[in-house]
Amino acid sequence: MHPRFDITLNKLREQHSYRECSLPSGLDLSSNDYLGLHDHPVLIRAAHEALEMGVAFGSGGSRLLRGNTAEHEALEQYAAYYHGCEKTLFFANGFMANHALLTSLPNRHDVILYDARVHASSRDGIQASVAKSVRIAHNDLADFADRLQQFRASADIIWIVVESLYSMDGDMAPLQQLYELAQVYQAILIVDEAHASGIWGVNGKGLCEQLCRPETDGAIRMPENLITLHTCGKALGVAGGIVCATATIIDTLINTCRPFIFSTAPPPIQAYMTLKSMELCASEEGARLRQQLKSICVTAQQLFGGHGTQIIPIILGDNQQAIEASTFMQQAGYDIRAIRPPTVPPGTSRLRLSLNVHITPSTLEDIRQLLSQLDTPATFVERSL
Ligand SMILES: Cc1ncc(COP(=O)(O)O)c(C=O)c1O
């Protein structure tokens, strides 16, 4: 074997950046299964019924060949109604959806302005895109405004790429102001709702719900210059990524997006279960679960600071300190993971507390107590706003 791979792995070990998979053990404080839907009894029953009804678990081909099924179409229609857009497109996962969007829509006459903390899937898509791209300091509206002004005359389309709720910091984007900037400079706003979908916004529709126009029949209508991405493997407990946009944008993706055209369609059972999960989110049970999660978010903020959301960063500093802290927590029975660069900026290695509906106040108090026993003092992030 060429020595390059061992050299790389050894270097990662020396830097305490080496990663390996481990099976879940201990109380879950690290998954994105915020509402506990991945094994919710209603959804388990739905999965059994679906298989008995003959919903297939393999699609057999790409969507444009024989892989398109009634389950895919039903999910996309429901998602369009739910999120108030003309059309949606379902991908196998959120990573693929982000990458696909950003490599297909912007062209070489365009400019992409992206927040410094967007997810790797957006960054990789931006990097692979032929458009010029500019990194904007996190949540810095003045920086966004300056760059919009700078590129308005020369760029064909300016794309603004942000997350509604940031995955490693738990803070929210100033969506209203970003949308106003997009309006002023005729830009298109792309919002990754991965960690807001199912939880935040009316009925868990995501934080972009606030940018939508209410219709007379109680539905909402997304503005034309907004594209949202809803991942289905986090609060929804299944897997997938749904892009919501105008019919023109979705038809453009269907016709030009290589990861859509040249890939086997997601399993019909995945589409079916995602639809069932969205319906559950919209039901009274969904509202009950969201209320439960938000109540534990309030307790967690009192104990650990953060932004009042389900994601709480506890900053340790370097990689080794973060790993030692997570090992300590795991030995105490809590599955809390260390997050290190490149997922977060160097010097901000951390524990990421990820709350779900099964967490109780006494668990959080115990964790607070354990944190005070660490050799390295943990830094809690002050509530912004
Ligand atoms: C903000 C954000 N966007 C996209 C993704 C990718 O979604 P998926 O896990 O469905 O591939 C993630 C995954 O962690 C994420 O945190």
Image: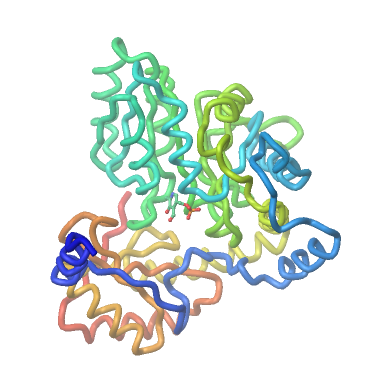
Residue 313: x percent and y percent?
31, 64
- Whether residue 327 sits left or right of residue 91 in the image: it is left
Name which residue lies at 50% across and 42% down: 97
- Whether residue 255 sits left or right of residue 50 in the image: it is left
- Whether residue 112 sits left or right of residue 56 in the image: it is left
Q: Looking at this view, name the residue that lies furthest to the top.
A: 153
In depth, the one of 347 and 22 nearer the eye is 22
Q: Quadrant of residue 358 in the image?
A: bottom right
Residue 170: x percent and y percent?
37, 56
- Examine the rendered structure and indicate whether residue 58 appears above or below residue 51: above
In depth, the one of 19 and 168 nearer the eye is 19
Residue 171: x percent and y percent?
36, 52
Name which residue lies at 39% across and 72% down: 21
Quadrant in which the N terminus is drawn? bottom left
Name which residue lies at 57% across and 51% down: 240
Q: Quadrant of residue 309 in the image?
A: bottom left
> How many marks can you see?
0
Residue 305: x percent and y percent?
32, 65
Q: Quadrant of residue 344 in the image?
A: bottom left
Name which residue lies at 28% across and 85% down: 328
